[in-house]
Amino acid sequence: MDEHSKLTRRESLVAAGGLVAAALIPTAAEAAGSGPAAVSSGAISCVLSPELTQGPYYVPNERVRRNITEGKPGTPLELRLTVVDASTCKAIKGAAVDIWHADAGGVYSGAIAGNAGTNFLRGVQRTDLKGLALFKSIYPGWYQGRAVHIHVKVHVSGSVVHTGQLFFNDGLTDTVFARKPYNTRGTRDVRNAQDSIYQGGGSRSLLRVIRKGTGYLGTISMGVRRT
């Protein structure tokens, strides 16, 4: 599917319904327990993640691994992606989180992207008891017509329960892109507000990013439906 194509009817309904990615509130969860009652009381904040188009560069059956850098240069980026049940806010153990993104030059790996035999900056991790999947990567680069983003799929019991894209604050991206190797490509042509996919729910899929060493740590909690 072309990333610039219109959302499907289902995706449009999800975006219009205000279904968002939100983080668990651990202290409240511990105090009030989990389940629908805790959700309805407001002790736990957890709702469905917005469905966003898969894009053209998905490659199925990727390797299960935490470090997906493959030696690609760029600002270090660690990702902590949590998967929870949108109905109960309980962590989902054993979910397969599948991510892929462009390198600092805006290039994707994989045969579909014209790089047969490569698999840099893509991989799969299984969530732990806390629903957490960890990845070691680099800050994505940009390519024409798109804001900076990371693609994500979540599989539970062999079924895809979420397809989305994760975004970054534009100010942070400006800071990263002022340094090598990103600053050798000129100014990116699309920021978040102009991105057609971001407009369908990307503001609700912004990673929370903090500095970590010489790079960054990005986190988000994705509420999904098991079926």
Image (tube, rainbow, N blue to C red):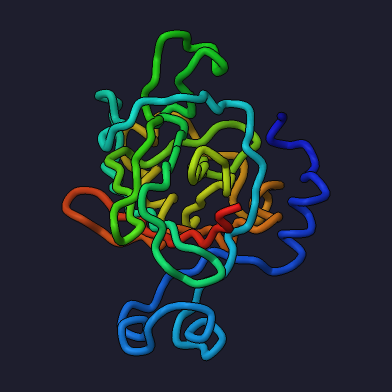
State the residue at coordinates (67%, 47%): 197
Residue at image location 55% in from the left, 58% down from the top: 224
In front: 219, or 73? 219
Most extreme residue toward the top is 116
Q: Where does the image place residue 10, in percent across and percent down from the top left? A: 78, 51
Task: Kindly give the residue lying farthest to the left in the view shown.
Answer: 213
Q: Is residue 126 left or right of residue 8?
A: left
Residue 65: horizontal and vertical position, in percent?
Answer: 29, 32
Q: Residue farthest to the right?
A: 9
Query: Which quadrant would the N terminus be assigned to in this image?
Result: top right
Q: How many numbered marks, from 0 up?
A: 0
The image position of residue 129, as x and y in percent, is 29, 58
Q: Position of residue 220 (x, y in %)?
A: 42, 60
133 vs 143: above or below = below
Query: In which image quadrant can residue 58 be found?
Result: top right
Camera-side residue: 72 or 61? Answer: 61
Q: Residue at x 52, y 24 (%)?
A: 59
Q: Residue at image x 52%, y 86%?
A: 37
